[in-house]
Amino acid sequence: MRSPFFCAIDTTDPDRAASLAEVAAAAGGGIKIGKEFFTRHGPEGVRRLCSGGEAPLFLDLKFHDIPNTVAGAVRAALALAPAILNVHAAGGRAMLNAAREAVETAGADRPKLIAVTVLTSLDADDLSEIGLAGPVETRTLALARLTRACGLDGVVCSPREIAPLRAALGPDFLLVVPGVRPAGAALGDQKRVMTPGEALRAGADHLVVGRPISAAEDPAAAARAIAAELAEAAA
């Protein structure tokens, strides 16, 4: 994967999606396709969007179901040749193991399989309301440890959990980080955020950037600025 950032294609408009994919590829980034685009256009829409092959694909469908169902979904997703594929860590050990075994059927060309820990739209009050008391960081670390124990490649985490997860899980465990906002950008529904440069310096491997590119007056310029900030942070 050529770049540490993926542009979120959060639209159902195929022309808009194609434009954002071109913007991401031109800036050296990848594309993240989630439930919104996938639900409208399905696998064929993903294939059309990725037909040029210029940008790696993060297929962000967050599978979370019984182990057999998730294993089948992972095997089906392999046909789209994603670079990264994800599931929910909260699905538990048996589900995570089933997902890993399914992704391994792709052999040496298999995608990286990562797990979602705690959604970046949630804070401690939100977790308490659904019966998951305790600090966000504690729950994130527990889910990340389970993910590593099951042999997955990494996790999705918020910027605020990068440093403790990197310290606890080592340098080879992938940290894919949404909730990234350039300085001065609106937070939207994200509650635990960081700038792209800060996230990379903290230890993130890949960033997911959505509205700071897609909602910008000039998406191409916004993508280039983020790529430049990341290049400076990595230097």
Image (cartoon, grey):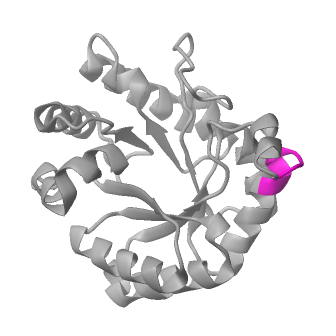
In which image quadrant can residue 88 be found?
Answer: bottom right
Vertical comparison of 15 with 212: above or below: below
Residue in view at x 54 percent, y 24 percent = 181
Vertical comparison of 229 with 46: above or below: above
Residue in view at x 57 percent, y 74 percent = 152
233 or 151, which is in the foreground? 151
Residues shaded magenta? 132-139
Vertical comparison of 96 with 84: above or below: below
Vertical comparison of 186 with 88: above or below: above
For the N terminus, the quadrant is bottom left
Residue in view at x 35 percent, y 24 percent = 213
Q: Decide whether residue 134 is among the magenta residues.
A: yes
144 or 67, which is in the foreground? 67
Residue 136 visible somewhere in the drawing: yes
Q: Position of residue 101 (x, y in %)?
A: 48, 88
Q: Position of residue 140 (x, y in %)?
A: 75, 54
- Residue at the right extreme of this rendering: 134
91 or 24, which is in the foreground? 91
